[in-house]
Image (tube, coloured by chain):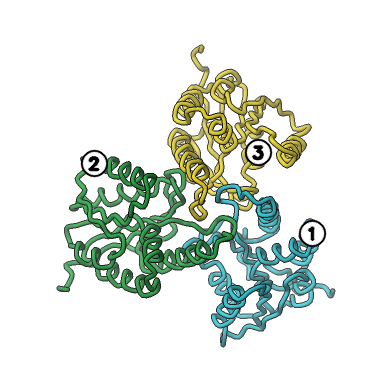
Chain colours: A cyan, B green, C yellow
Amino acid sequence: MPTPARRGTVTLVLGGARSGKSRFAEGLATATGLDLVYVATAQAFDDEMRERIARHRADRAGEGWRTVEAPLALAGVVAAESAPETALLVDCLTLWLTNVMLADLDVEREVDGLLAAIGAAQGPVVLVSNEVGYGIVPENALARAFRDHQGRLNQRVAAIADRVTLVAAGLPLDLKLPKEPTS
Amino acid sequence: MPTPARRGTVTLVLGGARSGKSRFAEGLATATGLDLVYVATAQAFDDEMRERIARHRADRAGEGWRTVEAPLALAGVVAAESAPETALLVDCLTLWLTNVMLADLDVEREVDGLLAAIGAAQGPVVLVSNEVGYGIVPENALARAFRDHQGRLNQRVAAIADRVTLVAAGLPLDLKLPKEPTS
Amino acid sequence: MPTPARRGTVTLVLGGARSGKSRFAEGLATATGLDLVYVATAQAFDDEMRERIARHRADRAGEGWRTVEAPLALAGVVAAESAPETALLVDCLTLWLTNVMLADLDVEREVDGLLAAIGAAQGPVVLVSNEVGYGIVPENALARAFRDHQGRLNQRVAAIADRVTLVAAGLPLDLKLPKEPTS
């Protein structure tokens, strides 16, 4: 990897389901004025998912996004697509984590790789992730494990992010802000 | 509908279950000093619900509220009861949405109607709604659909609201504030 | 109980599962510079729990904490351990409430006793609790009752606390701050 022209600003956008977090994250990426790459982690397992994915794509239609699929190889896609004149939007870490767990990969190792790729990004990276730990403890052991992994993943990404914003009902609430103005 | 004496201030109060959101919303309505109308959307399907409704009514007892039931016809009740000297408290949108879905009505159309009625309100309207999207994805398809509708409804009401406040452990956190002082 | 040298500062740290709330609360207690007592409410019912408890203890290892178990008799332990030169960390109210409900004790009476003990504490007390009401209504009646009790418990502790902080992705968001500087 060549010497980065500038290190990328990392933004984590957190929120619940249908909180408007993806829309807010898209706005952040678009506001950079850079080339836009949408890194899609969704994988369609059934008609409901296929419909959601299609709806999301339709929402972005004509807005100048190039879409790259990364249901599993997210670190590699971030490394390959990151560039000084490109804003990456990763939507979302929750579906990626689901895919990693369903594929029975080593979650900690995959997360380590992702964090390294984000840390080495040459342009801005906006990552969308769900808050999933604010309900009753799930009865299902896999759901509990997922909830734990998601919480730890969010903490780890938040720790290296320049900005962390929680979105509720479409409205942003900053949890962490950059010390100085960044792109 | 006659020319409104003044347009109503719209406040959305969001929170989890037992977060103190209804109590906070009641305080906002009471603080207007206007006549108080409590628009109740709850419908009792079983003893647990009947008990909750009775407890809520007891909490309001003797505090000067007139109660109007609106399990389904919420837009109509908001239009009919809204008046310059009346503060409306709608408690809550989550139960109303549940009723709309159980009655197999067209959710988008019902929400469109509600938003029009809120936008045309002649006095202040305070609406209470739940955040329900911060847990693990529900296994049940109806629960997933409900979660999606609730999230979108909250976003749409928040977009037209003058003030949006999240309540946690009885404590308010403003997500959106009016530009200028309002009633 | 002798006249307290000074009344204890009460801090409530709220958050979802794996939100980093315990780690944040530990930091608050450690920052007092006082003797540290960790009041553990966890009870191991199975291997998953035993593993979690062991992991938490390992996290605190060598950091100077004395651990006292209080799965049920929390009020008594707070009263017995509270001292002007000791910071108490209660981790967490959610597990304690679970234990109280599983033991079929009177929740309201137990909470009354806990609040009295916290109010009479002679040194700082930091309490960790979960937000569990931001998901879909649980189908299970016991889970619904738990959710209601947890929400009310959080509201009651928040009402007497000097500081209430919500932690998300390891980042604090203050919901209530002391009027004047406190220990």
Alpha-carbon span between mark 2 and mark 1: 57 Å
Horizontal side of residue B93 vs A158, given as left or right: left
**Residue A21 x %, y %:** 55, 66
- Disc ID at residue A112: 1
Q: Are marks 3 and 1 in contact (CB under 8 Å)?
A: no
Q: Are marks 2 and 3 in contact (CB under 8 Å)?
A: no
Query: Does A33 sit left or right of B10 as displayed?
Result: right
Element assignment for label 3? helix
Q: Which residue is mark 3?
A: C27
Q: Amino acid at mark 3?
A: Gly
Q: Are the residues flagged by discs 3 and 1 from a single subunit?
A: no
Q: Is residue A141 above or below residue A55?
A: above
In this rendering, the label closer to the viewer, 2 or 3:
2
Q: Indicate which label's residue lies in the foreground, 2 or 1.
A: 2
Q: Are marks 2 and 1 on the same chain?
A: no
| Chain letter of the residue carrying label 3 | C
